[in-house]
Amino acid sequence: MRFGVIGCGSYGSVHAELIASLGPRARLVAVADAVPERAAALAARLGCAASPDAAALCDRPDVDAVTVSVPHGLHAETVVAALEAGKHVLVEKPLEIDLAAADRIIAAERRTGRVVGVMSQRRFEPAALAARARVSGGELGRLTGGAAHTVAWRGQDYYDATPWRGSAKVEGGGALITLGVHALDLLIWLLGRPVEAQAQSGCLAHERIEVEDTLVGSVRFASGAIAGVTATTAACPGLPTRVAVYGDRGSVEIPVDPDERAAVRAQYRDFTAAVTDGRPPLVGTAAGRRVLATVLALYESARTGRTVPVPEEDPWT
């Protein structure tokens, strides 16, 4: 499969490097970025073409699929344009920053018949797959709860160096939507449909940002299980991410691998197989929308002080 990468920042460059390392399964054809010099430098390093912009990359007939790694609030416009140009798309998390924008992506996916995957590489780690098998097999009994704790440290330079970070309009939130979304996605994958959320949040250790650096909350699931959620970039020096699921016959805790590249490669393998086999990817737009809806419910609860319902299943299923 011939890939292009849109967005050559820190995560985009990682995607480009990983695609280039996939061997016969995939080939990196071109990259593009809003800063053309950044795309040119990455292209020179990896031996691919540098397109002048995203539209030019999507117009290339030698590109089958596009990885989108642009700021969160630009996902919908970028993904929809790529789909309408006939490309399959793997988009970085979160799917978008509001449900209306997420639904524009889903509508374009349906309209074009192309495949859209959402990056949630933690699902592909062996410990997560083993936990999913135990839950699905009923080994834990009735599920009663769980935890998704992302306890990280990011210095002020993390926000100052990248202007869109810390912007409510473009990033869509802070610690939860950017970092905690991975652990929350695993929790939802294991516990099922979330139905309501409660949270408190604040900006406690950073300046000049419009979003939270700390959120603590809880999510109730359709099964009745109740899970705690923590996401922070204000805990120096940071602790390992923790995801756990509890049941009345057993519990599991997932050790999250600090080196996620093997899991990213596994997600690319699943995505390319999904396109080839004509099946949905393991993490598609429905999963991306569900975790986004939960994030937004937690944010609304933190703003209002109320328990907030998580919207029912998306209208596309």
Image (cartoon, grey):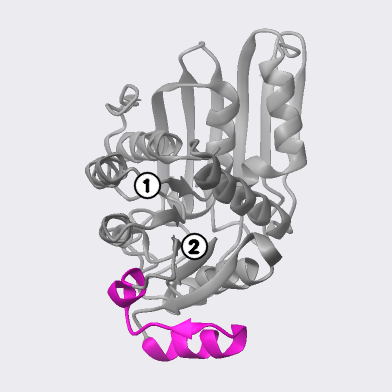
The alpha-carbon separation of the residues under discs 2 and 1 comes to 43 Å
Depth check: 11 or 115 in front? Answer: 115
Depth check: 317 or 63 in front? Answer: 63
Position above or below: 207 against 204: below
**Type of the residue with mark 1:** Arg
The N terminus appears in which quarter of the rendering? Answer: bottom right
User: Magenta: predominant secondary structure element?
Assistant: helix
Q: Which residue is mark 2?
A: 205
Q: Earlier in the sequence, mark 2 or mark 1?
A: 1
Callout 2 crowding tier (Cα within 10 Å): few <14, some 14–19, many ≥20? some
Can the viewer see residue 103? yes
- Residue at left 35%, top 41%? 299
Task: Name the side, left or right, on which 96 lies relative to 184.
Answer: left
**Splitting the image into 4 quarters, where does residue 244 fall?**
top right
Q: Is residue 49 magenta?
A: yes
Position above or below: 278 against 269: above
Callout 1 crowding tier (Cα within 10 Å): few <14, some 14–19, many ≥20? some
The location of residue 179, given as percent across then percent down, is: 53, 53
Q: Which residue is mark 1?
A: 114
Instruction: Tell me the SS state at disc 2.
Output: loop
**Type of the residue with mark 2:** Ala
Q: Nearer the viewer, mark 2 or mark 1?
A: 1
Task: Name the side, left or right, on which 135 lies relative to 79.
Answer: right
- Residue at left 30%, top 37%? 300
